Image: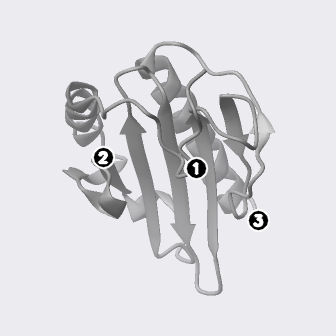
Amino acid sequence: MVPPTGDGGSPAPIDRPILEFLQTRLRATEQVEQATITNGSGHLELQVSLALRYYPATVSEAILTVRWYTNDDFKIQYREIHPENAWECRWDRHPNSHNTRTHFHPPPDASTPGNDASWPTDYRDVISLVLDEIEERIAALWNK
């Protein structure tokens, strides 16, 4: 058994070609302002700034951060900044001590432990699932 990393990561290296593929695809959509591969938080990751024109004016920033590992572990975090608080959640697949390997850290604060979950095996399907859930969140913001 692979030991938990404790940092929301994986014992495997980051899969840069997958991050580059996602960066190219996401940049081509109108919902994305910018998609950049960075060394954020000391980890190679894809940081995606979502277009605020799709959000109510109370949202000052919406960010999607993706880490994808060569063993298909991942950490995908979505975060919105509001005047009084932040709203965030996270989809994970990695060894850990708090949940099964696949789990979801629910909003509004992506709390740990999360909820055990099941994700598709293909990274494109995982990203589609995440983007669909973000669209549902945006619709809910407009319906408040």
Between residue 30 and residue 38, name the one nearer to us.
38
Q: Is residue 76 left or right of residue 4?
A: left
Could you say whether the residue bearing mark 1 is in a helix, strand or loop?
Answer: loop
| Mark-to-mark CA distance, 3 and 1 | 36 Å
> Which residue is drawn at the image coordinates 47% and 76% (left, top)?
60
Could you say whether the residue bearing mark 2 is in a helix, strand or loop?
Answer: strand
Q: Label 3, on which residue?
A: 144
Q: Is residue 51 left or right of residue 104?
A: left
> Which residue is drawn at the image coordinates 70% and 64% (left, top)?
109
Which label number is shown at residue 6?
1
Picture layout, residue 99 above or below residue 56: above
Which label number is shown at residue 46?
2
Which label number is shown at residue 143?
none
Could you say whether the residue bearing mark 3 is in a helix, strand or loop?
Answer: loop
> Which residue is drawn at the image coordinates 54% and 65% (left, top)?
80
> Which residue is drawn at the image coordinates 43% and 33% (left, top)?
11
Quadrant where the N terminus sits is: top right
Task: Please identify, in this view, whether the residue under mark 3 or under mark 2 is nearer the observer.
Answer: 2
Crowd rating for badge 3 (residues with CA inside 10 Å; few <14, some 14–19, many 20+): few
Crowd rating for badge 1 (residues with CA inside 10 Å; few <14, some 14–19, many 20+): few
Quadrant where the C terminus sits is: bottom right
User: Mark 1 or mark 2: which comes first in sequence?
Assistant: 1
